[in-house]
Image (spheres, rainbow, N blue to C red):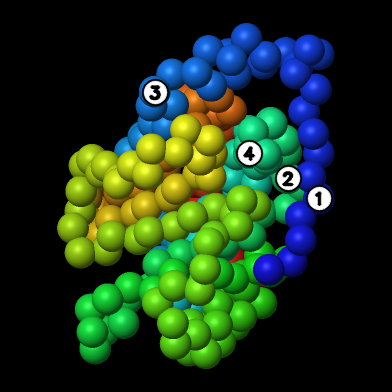
Amino acid sequence: MRESKINWIDIPTWDRAMHYQVFRNIPQPQYCVTFELDITQFLPRIRKKGYSFTFSMVYAVTRCASQVEAFRCRFVDGKPAVFDTINTSFTYLNPDTELFKVVNVDMQDTLREYVALASRTVLDQKEYFTGPMGNDIFQFSPFPWVSYTHISHTDSGNRDNAVPLFDWGKFYEKDGRIKLPFSVQVHHSFVDGVHIGKMADLLQTYLNDFSAG
């Protein structure tokens, strides 16, 4: 994976210091939010290009969430920091065994480049797990079999895990629009509801306006 520069956060001068400390010390600082996305414009356009929906969504979410600094914040050796670049790690199902593998793919400048790299990486990787995931990633675990209204996740008990986890369910038609259940789990020391709202607005705009690779 390509390396990402770490920018340390100076807690005494950080305007978020108090909120950071409050959530830093509670037993369960991660929380999950589920909402709908509209993919009416996005879905047929990527299908026309022959792009994988999974790879396309991973790229779109990474591109948009990276624009909100709170989503790039992590704990590094127990200290708060901001990464300048975020890469991707997603689950991918083996249809023969019905077991998933975790695939790590560097973020690219364009969707076309990302889809091509992800496609090659999925085919080349034979192992289900290739080692510990990095800290400078977004984690994805698509759940395309059910149009869920809520989702929860396994809990490792690691309170310093601030890597956002994104999911989406089975898309469906509603009032002539194509809707996608979408979830994000974040660490409250860094990400508040307002930040999720900004990310959601950026992502929906991208999905609406997408026209090129």
The amino acid on which the numbered mark 4 sits, given as a three-letter code, is Arg
Can you identify the residue that label 2 sits on?
83
Q: Are marks 1 and 4 in contact (CB under 8 Å)?
A: no
Can you identify the residue that label 3 sits on?
27
Which quadrant holds the N terminus? bottom right
The amino acid on which the numbered mark 2 sits, given as a three-letter code, is Phe
Q: Are marks 2 and 1 in contact (CB under 8 Å)?
A: yes
Report the residue at 59% width, 45% height from top: 65
Q: What whole-number distance in Å separates the C-alpha atoms at marks 3 and 2?
A: 25 Å
Q: Quadrant of residue 152?
A: top left
Q: Are marks 2 and 4 in contact (CB under 8 Å)?
A: yes
Can you identify the residue that label 4 sits on?
74
Q: Nearer the viewer, mark 3 or mark 2?
A: 3
User: Would residue 179 be found to the left or right of residue 76 on screen?
Assistant: left
For label 2, count other residues whose C-alpha is less than 10 Å away and answer few (under 14), some (14-19) or many (20+).
many
Q: Nearer the viewer, mark 3 or mark 1?
A: 3
For label 4, count other residues whose C-alpha is less than 10 Å away and answer few (under 14), some (14-19) or many (20+).
many
The amino acid on which the numbered mark 1 sits, given as a three-letter code, is Lys
Q: Earlier in the sequence, mark 4 or mark 3?
A: 3
Q: Which mark is residue 5?
A: 1
Q: Position of residue 204 (x, y in %)?
A: 49, 46
Report the residue at 76% width, 61% height from top: 3
